[in-house]
Amino acid sequence: MNQLHILNGDATLTGFNQTGLDGEVLVWREVFSEGPLSVRLDADFWTRRANWISNAFEDAAGSYQENVLLELEKLNEPYEEINLWFEFDLHCQVNLLGVMQLLKQEVNLTAPALYLICPDSFPGVENFKGMGQLNGDQLEDLYDTRLHLTEYDFIIATEAWKTYIQFDAEALQQWIDATPFWGSLHLLKPALEAQVKRLQVSSGGLNFIEQKLLQFYQNGIATRNGLYQSFWSEAPIYGMGDAELDIYLKRLEDKLLIKLINE
């Protein structure tokens, strides 16, 4: 059977390569939880994303083409089955929504069977953060519990995507409250609720993530790594890596609210 496995990031790739699962692998290396988004993922969208990524993360010229756009060319091949490997946090769930929009645009969805592998825990693994913690046998166990994605799931994903990209806390909360059934997207609701919290800004002009980082700093944590670890421990629902958290730390530095100690 001609299969495609879409993995959210390189962290899962090492363990996936230890499995006996057949098929092509597409590594999704975008971070739709940050930066500009739009309804359609067209050529203009990818140009704006490439420009934003290169500026926000100081990526070398051409790396976006190699790491993201060349990978997406794998969608041009015909598949009998497509498996989406995404986790529970906001970072992964927004990427999942984006991938589902892209599949709806670029792939004849009447042809392949579509499945979701989306864990928020794993037996025997404490403090589960993601599939990058798992070995090949464990990932095969997850594969055996995958969920079949239906037309309804794609309707929910489209509605969620269109609402998310408004970046409006009230509109997003209203949509969450009005959605009685989440289908196979069983971990989307808590991730979007975390986004609502992130969109709300304090009287001092700080969002939730900036407030948490500032709180840790005021409690005596002044190193970059220390702030990373504190945030990951207290707010794993956001799923942010150090490069993403650096965006918020820079905002705090620019406002002269923190001064980090070099490690």
Image: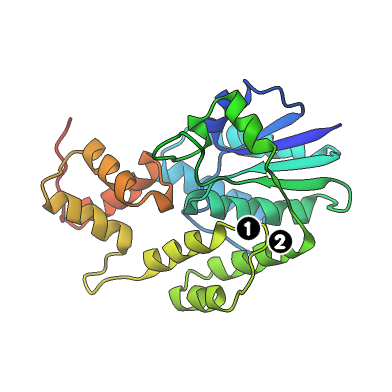
In the displayed structure, would residue 100 be above or below residue 177? Answer: above
Relative to 204, residue 11 above or below: above
- Tell me the residue at 28%/40% (across/down): 229
Work out which residue is located at the far right of the displayed protein and give it.
Answer: 111
Left or right for 13, reference 168: right
Which residue sits furthest front? 124
Dots 2, 1 in contact, CB < 8 A = yes
The residue at 78%/62% (across/down) is 151
- Indicate the quadrant where residue 228 lies: top left
SS for dot 1: loop
Task: Out of 25 and 55, give the one closest to the viewer.
Answer: 25
Q: What SS does tag 2 mark? A: helix
Where residue 160 sits in the image (x, y, percent)?
60, 66
Is 69 drawn above or below residue 200 in the view shown? above
Residue marked by disc 2:
153
Whether residue 165 can be seen here: no
User: Mark 1 = which residue?
Assistant: 185
If you read the primary sequence from the N terminus, does the residue marked by circle 2 or circle 1 appear first? 2
